[in-house]
Amino acid sequence: QVQFVESGGGLVQPGGSLRLSCAASGSIVRDYATMMAWYRQVPGKQRELVAAITGGGSTNYADSVRGRFTISRDNAKNTVYLQMNSLKSEDTAVYYCKASQWGKDYWGQGTQVTVSS
């Protein structure tokens, strides 16, 4: 069973920055076949894709965060990161990491990000 430890969420003012981390048990992150992604969800809305990164390092971003957020993975540490800059109030949400491998999805427990003055 894959387990994740997410950290880095919190309260930040508009324009500020946060870095989310998602550390996985085992070696799933360093597996080339694993797609890692960050999603976010606000109450009453569907969970939405924020950013994704393939085993080869190709990335994809939601239009709303492109140019402000950066996803990366450290295979040696079995960890994926989401650097979030120029945060806006609309970025407020619970952020989840997900690993997709061989048709299976594994989710983290989520970390709250609140952008407010």
Image: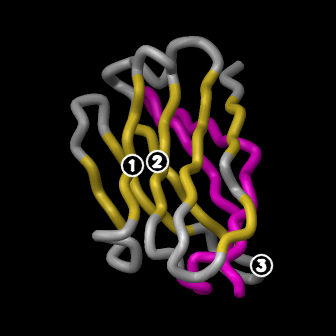
Disc 2, disc 1: CB below 8 Å? Answer: yes
Screen quadrant of the N terminus: top right
Give the class, few, some or many, for how many residues have Cα within 10 Å of label 2's Cα (few <14, many ≥20): many
Q: Which residue is mark 2?
A: 37
Residue that appears at 58% across and 41% down: 21
- Structural distance between the alpha carbons of marks 3 and 2: 20 Å
Disc 3, disc 2: CB below 8 Å? Answer: no
Residue that appears at 45% across and 29% down: 101
SS of the residue at dot 1? Answer: strand
Name the one closer to the observer, 39 or 5: 5
- Structural distance between the alpha carbons of marks 2 and 1: 8 Å
**How many numbered marks appear?**
3
Amino acid, disc 1: Ile
Name the one closer to the observer, 67 or 61: 67
Q: Is residue 102 above or below residue 41?
A: above
Q: Is residue 59 above or below residue 74?
A: below
Screen quadrant of the C terminus: bottom right
Q: Which residue is mark 3?
A: 43
- Counting residues from the N terminus, which is met first, the one under dot 2 or under dot 1? 2
Badge number at residue 71: 1
Give the class, few, some or many, for how many residues have Cα within 10 Å of label 3's Cα (few <14, many ≥20): few
Predominant SS along the magenta part = strand
Amino acid, disc 3: Pro
- Structural distance between the alpha carbons of marks 3 and 1: 24 Å
Decide if residue 52 is on the left or right side of residue 23. Answer: left
Q: Position of residue 90 (x, y in %)?
A: 58, 85
Q: Which residues are magenta?
A: 88-117
Amino acid, disc 2: Ala
SS of the residue at dot 2? Answer: strand
Residue that appears at 33% across and 77% down: 63
Q: Position of residue 93 (x, y in %)?
A: 68, 71
